[in-house]
Amino acid sequence: MKRILSLLTIFNLSTSWITSVVACNKEKFLGDIWVVMNDGYHDDQSFTEYVYRGADEFVKKIMDKSDYNAAYKELGEIGEASLRSAYENVVGGGAKVLVLSGYSHDAIAKGYFDEVIKKVNGSAVIVDNKTYKNWTSTVGVQYRADISGFYAGMASIIWSIINDNYNLNNKTLGLATFGGLLPGNQNSVINYMAGFLSAIDVWNIIKENQNNKYHEYKNKLVNLDKYGKLKDWLDNNEFKVLRTQKDPSGDGDFGWQSGSYTAGDGKDISNILINQGANILMPVAGPQTEDALAILKNDSSKKAKVVGVDVDMSKVYRSYDKLILTSAIKQLTEGGLIALAHTDIYKDNIEYQDKAAQYAKDNNIEVILKDENKQNFENKKVNFDKEKGKSWQTKTAWLSGEATSGESNLVEDYINNAIIEMFSKDSLIVMSNYYYEHTMKENPKLSFELLKASFTKEMALKVFQN
């Protein structure tokens, strides 16, 4: 019965303010909130599970229904017809709020969920995707994953030099990355990849420039390593940090994508990139992180480590000891929960608003809103106490990025903390805004253009603009 809710479509629900579905294993599901998933599962230990957790924690922590779970519908596929049918079925069955996981609900279903939920005066939250001005029932949740990717890339470079995770023969440290699919994923996949690659450029800018501004960065980096290895790499031109991939030729370039987000499909490209000299590999393709990890675990002659994305992969893949450097993460659970509190359905509930505001403070959530009726971001972070009772529908909540360290991650906390001190989230906003200026304008850059070395070099230069 693990997938029972995937099989439930239209059914009769009570007319009381709490509607529930009871599966044969006696779990109770709150029928007011439904999470509609495309190609992931509510317990897949990856992106989709953490989106689901946001809805589930809202039910338990904000609504105080600890005996209930958020309802979910798992499709196991990406297709317009199946998505449209899913929206109609759950809303026809009594759903008041839809939570959507990922870009497919925009790129493939074309926002049809907003039309469906609007008919019942309900609301929607789409996680890892913007909303639009004509999606009047929807709150978007987006992430500055470029910042996450940058932090993960820089931490991985520093750790790898200190711990000799590089090609000893030619004294190069190679970084590579790939996505599941490039087209249409500028703000959910490519941003991770571009931020990760820009860390290479930032390292090399610091190394190559001699003026006092860059010496300050250089000195801080050198102080992280008592053995002098970082100093050698910064002072000696025979040591090189570089990307191992040629610039992508187009959105169809399979040197940069596996072609899906399905487990197993990342084996070939992972193997190719590692054999081409990648010492640090960041797959941005859901469960394909494990494809890369399995290759390294089964062949100890391959000298490489892996960077996870979305969630702390060191906690997900515990059997791959000493292979995961860090993870570039998004606050998927936190972002979804906060967005639910600011739907029209729940914004007037004082108790929910108080709890959500406290939750945001407790979890150090930073949000900048973008009203999709306007062109620009709001110029300051959200004050959650002042936002109580306000709807975010037609707005996109942007959350900042971060990377993991310590515990089962190879990257130690002291490295991560030092990087954040050198490159604060606020200081990286200039870089981040530069990226999104090129993805959200009328004629945005295509995915492959954002991965070119010339573009990530421009991103890196913005880091020092502050």
Image (cartoon, rainbow, N blue to C red):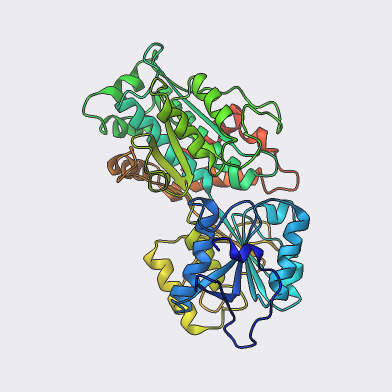
| One can see residue 391 in this view | no
* Vertical relation: 286 (above or below) 360: above
| Residue at 63% across, 62% down | 6
Give residue 45's position: percent from left, percent from top. 48, 51
Side of 324 where 131 appears, left or right: right
The number of callouts visible is 0
| Residue at 68% across, 76% down | 122
| One can see residue 324 in this view | yes
Give residue 372's position: percent from left, percent from top. 68, 61
Q: Quadrant of residue 254?
A: top right
Side of 289 where 312 appears, left or right: left
Quarter of the image containing the N terminus? bottom right
Side of 399 where 418 appears, left or right: left
Of residues 92 and 110, which is closer to you in this image? 92
Give residue 392's position: percent from left, percent from top. 60, 69
Outermost residue to the bottom: 16
Q: Quadrant of residue 90?
A: bottom right
| Residue at 31% across, 32% down | 221
Of residues 299 and 398, which is closer to you in this image? 299
Of residues 142 and 51, which is closer to you in this image? 51
Outermost residue to the left: 226
* Vertical relation: 209 (above or below) 68: above
Give residue 307's position: percent from left, percent from top. 44, 37
